Image: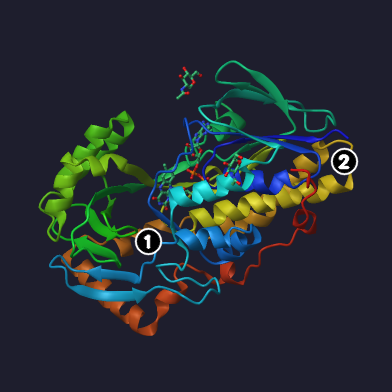
Amino acid sequence: MAGLKVLIVGGGIAGPALAHWLSRVAGAHITLVERAPQVRASGQQIDLRAQGVDMMRKMGIEPAVRAVVVHEPGAQLIDTKGKTKAFFPATKTGTGKQSITSEYEIMRGDLVRILYAVTENRSNVQHLYNTTIDSFTQDDESDPNGKVHVTFQDGRKDDFDLVVGADGAGSKTRKIMLGPDAPDPRRRHGGYIGYFSVLAKPWDSDRGTVCMLPGSRVSRAIGTRKDCKELTRVYMMTRGEIPAIDAAYKSGDLTQLKKAWADLYEGGGWECERFVHGLRNAPEADDFYCTPLEEVQLSPGSWTKGRVALIGDAAHCHTANGFGTTWGLIGAYILAGEIATLYAKDMASPTAAVVQGAKNYEERFRPIATVSHGSTQQFQSFMFPSSRFGIWCLYTLARAAAYLNLGQSYGEGGKTSKWKLPDYPVLEEDRNPSN
Ligand SMILES: Cc1cc2nc3c(=O)[nH]c(=O)nc-3n(C[C@H](O)[C@H](O)[C@H](O)COP(=O)(O)OP(=O)(O)OC[C@H]3O[C@@H](n4cnc5c(N)ncnc54)[C@H](O)[C@@H]3O)c2cc1C
Ligand SMILES: *[C@@H]1O[C@H](CO)[C@@H](O)[C@H](O)[C@H]1NC(C)=O
Ligand SMILES: *[C@@H]1O[C@H](CO)[C@@H](O)[C@H](O)[C@H]1NC(C)=O
């Protein structure tokens, strides 16, 4: 038996999920590399929605997730005086249909740790931190004994039957796979999201809270969420051209980046003064994280190339649609399922199963994972209005939606809500039970 030797690049959400599924395939050996020196557990609240809830159950991690979920009673819109304009209660139905506040709100770091623990002690999964790839080449797709030849950053070389990029929106694996002349598939929508923590005050709401700030050339929203007693997490969202943030983001200088955000929100009303002061000065804000609003738009057929495939944000990132975690987990499962199904039929050489399985994965999952692609501009100009009239419209609509309970199926289009998670019998049984 030839075995199936896999390299997964990126230990975020999608990477460890894929390691779990592939580790059940007979003869599989998985190396998971993460650039950071240890589990990269930063990030704020993320959520599992729709089929992501079924996915979590299939992975057997529901008890672990439930043990750490954030109990958020719902989401509210407030005005700059702190007055509630609309409230969307959290879902508690367990059916998968989720409100703006999902029943499975979880801190990103907790989910990364849960996913890591699933394969932590499996003998056919190796976790390497402080490790990344430098380059790779691969043999022709038609070569039954072909491999991907990988050079790691430290100069080490190794061959794999399958290499998967789970290294996020800025994926290096994608860059190498597409080649030096390919255009960057990231589309910026103009605007950023930034998060950080401040010391909590007794009056900070335990609801997810959003406040639209009027009176600026660019759209600004600021909000809070609470997952623990001591800290309040602050979220900032902007739309439009913001040269100071663009420049600071490009420079990678965290101090400059914090200053650009603080300057933009100075004097914004509500609790801005306190938050901006924290952002500029307090150690709690050292967890500051900032990401542009962007979409990864790869042309059809280019999620994979031969024995190399992309999953999660590397394949289909859409920063603000709320489905990043859900689609990241599901894509990993589908890629593993498609390859494992074909490989089980002919274990003499993994090449054919890998190449065809990867193609099938894209064909099956792309229409679902990219359903909200391209719609961002309209969505965001509605969600983040900057004029006082725009803000008034938003409040009115939000109140109506809360009344009609539309919040209960947030973000689910007809196409995705009818879609069912595929079944892969081959993955149901652990074919490496000695682990
Ligand atoms: C630090 C961080 C904080 C985040 N915070 C939030 C948040 O608060 N809210 C939210 O909705 N989404 C957040 N996200 C995004 C969210 O995790 C993803 O949208 C989604 O879960 C899909 O996950 P993914 O595994 O595809 O990508 P990611 O979660 O981005 O994981 C990619 C992983 O790959 C690693 N990596 C990157 N490049 C390389 C390389 N060259 N070699 C090896 N490893 C590499 C990264 O360190 C990271 O661990 C955050 C992502 C990160 C990395
Ligand atoms: C893995 O093994 C180590 C050492 O025996 C143990 O401390 C750890 O809890 C185990 N992890 C899981 C997820 O079981
Ligand atoms: C990470 O690896 C590099 C060499 O590849 C080494 O110089 C550095 O000390 C390592 N860092 C940690 C935290 O292990």
> Badge 2: how crowded within 10 Å, few (<14), some, or many (20+)?
some
Image quarter for ligand 2 equals top right
Q: Quadrant of the C terminus?
A: top right
Q: Is residue 316 depicted above or below 260 in this figure? A: below
Number of marks present in the image shown: 2
Residue 176: % across, % down: 58, 29
Report the amino acid beneath label 2.
Met
In this rendered view, identify the residue nearer to me: 159 or 239.
159
**114 and 154: which one is in front?**
114
Q: Earlier in the sequence, mark 1 or mark 2?
A: 2
> Which is nearer the eye, 405 or 392?
405
- What distance separates the C-alpha of mark 1 from that of mark 2? 49 Å
Label 1 belongs to which residue? 378
Q: Which mark is residue 210?
A: none
Residue sitting farthest toward the left: 267
The percent position of residue 404, horizontal first and vertical second, equals: 38, 84
Determine which residue is flagged by label 2.
347
- The x and y percentages for residue 420 are 66, 67
> Callout 1: helix, strand or loop?
helix
Residue 209 lies in quadrant:
bottom left
